[in-house]
Image (cartoon, rainbow, N blue to C red):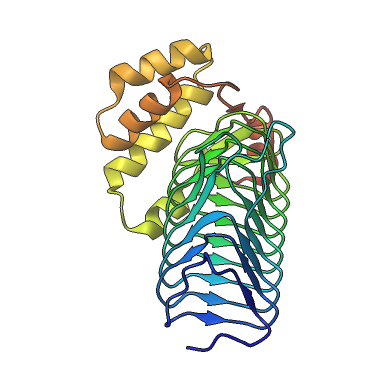
Amino acid sequence: MPIHPTAIIDKQAYVPASCDIGPHSVIEGPVKLGERVKIYPNAYLSGWTEIGDDCQIHPGAVVGHLPQDFHFTGERSYCRIGKGTIVREFASIHRGTQPESWTILGDNCFILAYAHIGHNCELGSGVKLYNCSALSGHVVVGDNAIISGYSLVHQFARIGEFVMVGGGARVTKDIPPYMKALYESQCVGHNVIGMRRSGLFTREDIHEVRESYRTLYRSGLPFRKAVEQLASQARYRTGKRLVEFCQAPTKLGIAGGWKVENELSEATGDDIE
């Protein structure tokens, strides 16, 4: 496929013949592209960056550039984008800060326009970052999580798999798997729609997440005691995964529940779940 004559490609870069490189795009340094990668006009790729097969890098996107970190002193670090991932207009993905460290995205992620993924982030497969959302450094996001538009995620936060973060949220705490988060790191329920649509969970799996949410956020127990109770009652993989996540080391703590959920439910006549 074509390489436009105005594209600038470093001699160190590896670009298979099946790639499509658009006008005025720049590939600087030892960038390695997979098969059938499409680079749109004016995209910029740099550093020790690996782009998986069938990825798309859209106009103005920046992948593998220097981290926005005062601690960075120029050593070699890396960025890896999994196969089938789409990076839309003017999104930015920076490589690691510490020497030999990585920023990693899994397969089939969808990074929408103006989204930002900071240094040393680790995203699983199927993650979606919507327009203008931003991940600070060292954020970990589980498989199939959705970060909605204009959401901000604090450095070192952990977001579990199948989490749904609502638009404009500020995530300053860890969000357990399968939960919905809004506002200031508030878990407002479980992501039943996302779990059902995935086809990966049984009715029992989803029911256990619902009951786990009630134990963690509606029982009135101190959170640590609630986790201990959940550990004693979890039977299925989803409940056990929630226990594992909540008991793992954390730098920020675990997000709390939505304090006004009962009032909203009564006012609307709706079931929050």
Residue at 48% across, 12% down: 224
Please give the count of numbered marks on the rendered protein. Answer: 0
Residue 269 to residue 111: above or below: above
Residue at 67% across, 44% down: 67
Q: Determine whether, in the image, residue 89 is placed left or right of residue 249.
A: right
Q: Determine whether, in the image, residue 236 is placed left or right of residue 102.
A: left
Residue at 52% across, 21% down: 250
Q: Nearer the viewer, residue 225 or 140?
A: 140
Q: Determine whether, in the image, residue 158 is placed left or right of residue 169.
A: left
Residue 89 falls in image quadrant: bottom right
Location of residue 2 in the rendering, given as x and y in whole percent from the top left corner: 53, 89
Location of residue 221 in the rendering, given as x and y in whole percent from the top left corner: 51, 12
Residue 115 falls in image quadrant: bottom right
Location of residue 242 in the rendering, given as x and y in whole percent from the top left corner: 39, 30
Location of residue 113 in the rendering, given as x and y in whole percent from the top left corner: 69, 64
Q: Nearer the viewer, residue 73 or 193?
A: 73
Q: Determine whether, in the image, residue 6 is placed left or right of residue 144.
A: right
Q: Nearer the viewer, residue 194 or 24?
A: 24
Residue at 56% across, 40% down: 120
Residue 236 to residue 149: above or below: above
Q: Nearer the viewer, residue 62 or 262?
A: 62
